[in-house]
Image: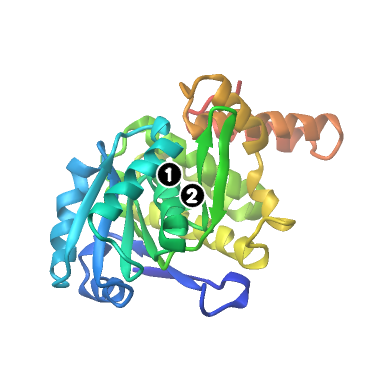
Amino acid sequence: MDRIKVNVEKSCKDSYEIFIGEDIIGREGLISRMKNHADRFVIITDSHVNPLYGEKVRERLGEADLPVDIIEIPAGESSKSLNTVLDVAKQLVRLKVGRKSLLIALGGGVVGDLAGFVASIYMRSVPYVQIPTTLLAQVDSSVGGKTGVDLPEGKNLLGTFYQPKAVYADLVCLKTLSDRDFANGMAEIIKYGIIGDHNLFELLEHESSGIKKADPSLMRSLVGRSCKIKAEIVEMDEKELGLRRILNFGHTIGHAIEAASGYSLSHGEAVAIGMVGAAKISNRLDYLDSASYTRIVDLIKEYKLPTR
């Protein structure tokens, strides 16, 4: 099992670890770590993930001899809304959840963003951990403390910076992803290769066959390197006042495309198109040479992502 420390603004209070491995939720030591943060657990998950992992996680957490409840929301981007926040908050009240309870975000980016936002505002904040089940969530949205929900006017217009107590990226979850969901996460990994790790970019070029087959050793490397890049950037700029904006490469254009498509395009697909657009603008302005632009486009195509 790999571990990556995120030292948020050099504060011990807000620092946490990212655990990466296979079947890590089944390890006794990690359950003990969760128990240190709580007197009960509440799993927030969605209608797609709950049948796959909900009961498994509930049973494992039950070994801590603490109460465990599950709150299920409908799967999909439409759940990332204030209506869902209110519904979840009311369920927490009915369950008599207090500040010593631990919320557990079990799912992809929508669940993680929503559960983190609820955790940041319920009773003026309760602790939470992330158990991301999609590749995109494991390498991006679960790390860094960005939480939020959408408004009709746009994505992520309401949100907070609120760091989790820990992130548990279980690579076993990747085995249940569709090809589209896998490619969705690869868009963010490609982003990291472009903005922060030339060697990662070359690995994506040279090992595409094994990566597309989700080779375990390659996936462990990709998830670990992606989390490390993001963690290093977050440590230097938690609140996105400067350097952290580099993580938005492809997202400025991508968010507009995603919304304009009525969310028929996935986040990763929209970001892929956004990266091509940003790279093209950079090429036109002579900030990016044509050979590098072509490599970016070719790599995105290699992983079956759209470029326009």
Q: Amino acid at mark 2?
A: Ser
Quarter of image, res 41: bottom left
Quarter of image, res 293: top right
Q: In the image, is 142 to the left or to the right of 155?
A: left
Residue 259, horizontal then vertical, whole percent: 56, 25
Q: What residue does disc 2 label?
A: 141
Q: In the image, is 280 to the left or to the right of 106?
A: right
**Image quarter (top left, top right, bottom left or bottom right) of the C terminus:** top right
Q: Are marks 1 and 2 in contact (CB under 8 Å)?
A: yes
Q: Can residue 284 be seen?
A: yes
Above or below, 166 against 82 in this view is below
Q: What residue does disc 1 label?
A: 109
Residue 246, horizontal then vertical, whole percent: 69, 50
Q: Secondary structure at mark 1?
A: helix
Q: Can residue 210 be seen?
A: no
Q: Please tell me how crowded label 1 is: few (under 14), some (14-19), or many (20+) other residues with Cα within 10 Å.
A: many
Above or below, 150 against 263 in this view is below
